[in-house]
Amino acid sequence: MSGGHFDYDQYRIDNIANEVEQLIIMNGVEQNTGENWYDYTFVQNYSPEVIEEFKKGLKILRMATIYAQRIDWLVSGDDGEEQFLKRLAADLDELENKK
């Protein structure tokens, strides 16, 4: 069945996480909004304290994506309880070992 219990909304959480990650990466970087020299250029300069909170939020969002995916597969019948627990632990370990 490959999930579907949550209408694949876990991918929406992941998209939010990706956007937060881009905000962190692009903080303080000049961005041009168009292809012409006269197009508006802007820089987002969030404080280090705010960026640290973004990083905390990013980790929470990544964890939420993992939990939603694993729960989705369990309740959809793709995984049994044992697989759910093993895959959840593996996914969380992988997340923890990134960066």
Image (tube, rainbow, N blue to C red):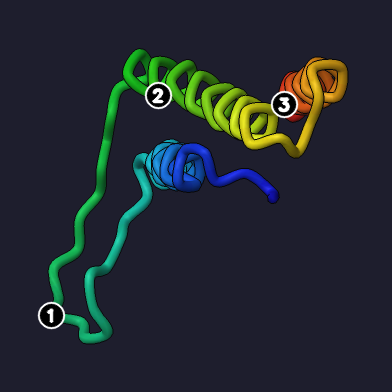
Q: Nearer the viewer, mark 3 or mark 2?
A: 3
Q: Nearer the viewer, residue 26 or 56?
A: 56
The quarter in which the C terminus is drawn is top right
Q: Nearer the viewer, mark 1 or mark 2?
A: 2
Q: Nearer the viewer, residue 16 or 6?
A: 6
Q: Which amino acid type is marked by label 2?
A: Phe
Residue displayed at 37% across by 50% down: 29
Q: Quadrant of residue 86?
A: top right
Which of the marked residues, 1 or 2, is nearer the chain's N terminus? 1
Figure check: 52 above or below 4: above
Q: CA distance from mark 1 to mark 3?
A: 42 Å
Q: CA distance from mark 1 to mark 2?
A: 31 Å
Picture coordinates of residue 88 (x, y %)?
75, 21
- Residue 38 - label: 1
Which of the marked residues, 1 or 3, is nearer the chain's N terminus? 1
Q: Which amino acid type is marked by label 3?
A: Leu
Picture coordinates of residue 32 (x, y %)?
27, 68
